[in-house]
Each structure stands twice: as structure tokens, then as C-alpha cells.
């Protein structure tokens, strides 16, 4: 196969519409634009959403909702997921290296979900009240 021999599949391309070539073509005289009006003229266009001066839909409807730009910066980690960590030290860097927290997260919080069987030392990571009790019950400690 050579680049100069490549062709589109049969029927994939269509001939360009030739306008203004006589009555018999179906696209003569006004070239399919109809009679008069802004859209019939050369350079006659208006911006997207323009409704002829009527208040456009996107301005008639009320603004609703809000997406925080800082959303997703604090990642939640389930308690049972801490079993995947190789060591007994839990901090933001070790959570990122284990893939439990996305790289863009600036903070993390451990949430009570499941159980933990080994003693862990949690440092620099937020912990919910229930998760704190579960970690301390397993013999671990939380360093603020």
C-alpha cells in the first residue's frame, strides 16, 4: 500500500453541490437560499442562539447550580482499602503511590467502611470519627 494509491471507500464521498447553474439543476437562480431575507444575502449571518432580537433561550432560563473548581481535591479513602498499603505508615504520598488517591488530590480523608486488622500509623490524613475508633481498636494510632 502506498500513500498515493489510497482512496475513500466506494460511496463514501459525494460530489460538491454546484449552485447557480440553471433552472434544470434545481439549484439555479437563488441557489437554494429562497427569496430575500438575511439568510439569502452574502455575509448574512447571525450568532448562534440569536432569535431575531427576541430574548434568547439561554438568557430567558434562570441560572442554576454551581460546579466548584476545587471539587475533587480532597479524596476519600475507604478503611478496608488501607489493606493494600505495603507498609504500616499511612500518609498522602503513600496513598498516591498505592493508587488509592488520584495524583491531583491535595488532601485525603479516611472513611469508615469495612474493617482493618493491622495496626497503622496515620499521619497528615483526615480521619472520620468512626474510622478513628476502628484504627485505634486495631492497635494503630493517628498523628495530627
Image (cartoon, rainbow, N blue to C red):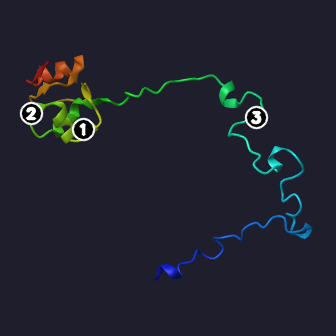
Q: Nearer the viewer, residue 46 or 97?
A: 46
Earlier residue among tags 1 and 3: 3
Query: What residue is pinned by disc 2?
Result: 88
134 up-or-down from 44: above or below: above
Q: Residue at x 51, y 81 (%)?
A: 4
Q: Residue at x 63, y 22 (%)?
A: 62
- State whether residue 42 is above or below residue 112: below
Cα separation, mark 1 vs mark 3, equals 50 Å
Question: What is the crowding at mark 2: few (fewer than 14 residues within 10 Å), some, or many (at least 20)?
Answer: some
Q: Which residue is mark 3?
A: 51
Image quarter of residue 84:
top left
Residue ID for mark 1: 100
Q: Is residue 28 left or right of residue 61?
A: right
Q: Report x, y in % for residue 48.
A: 68, 40
Image quadrant of residue 37? Answer: top right
Q: Secondary structure at mark 1?
A: loop
Amino acid at each position: 500500500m502506498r500513500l498515493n494509491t489510497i482512496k475513500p471507500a466506494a460511496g463514501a464521498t459525494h460530489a460538491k453541490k454546484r449552485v447557480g447553474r440553471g433552472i434544470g439543476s434545481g439549484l439555479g437562480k437563488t441557489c437554494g437560499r429562497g427569496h430575500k431575507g438575511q439568510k439569502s444575502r452574502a455575509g448574512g449571518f447571525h450568532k448562534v442562539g440569536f432569535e431575531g432580537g427576541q430574548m434568547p433561550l439561554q438568557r430567558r432560563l434562570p441560572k442554576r447550580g454551581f460546579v466548584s473548581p476545587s471539587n475533587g481535591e480532597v479524596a476519600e479513602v475507604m478503611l478496608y482499602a488501607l489493606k493494600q498499603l505495603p507498609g504500616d505508615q499511612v500518609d498522602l504520598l503513600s496513598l498516591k503511590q498505592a493508587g488509592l488517591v488520584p495524583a491531583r488530590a491535595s488532601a485525603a480523608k479516611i472513611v469508615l467502611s469495612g474493617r482493618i486488622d493491622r495496626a497503622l500509623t496515620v499521619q497528615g490524613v483526615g480521619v472520620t470519627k468512626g474510622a478513628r475508633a476502628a484504627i485505634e481498636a486495631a492497635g494503630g494510632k493517628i498523628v495530627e
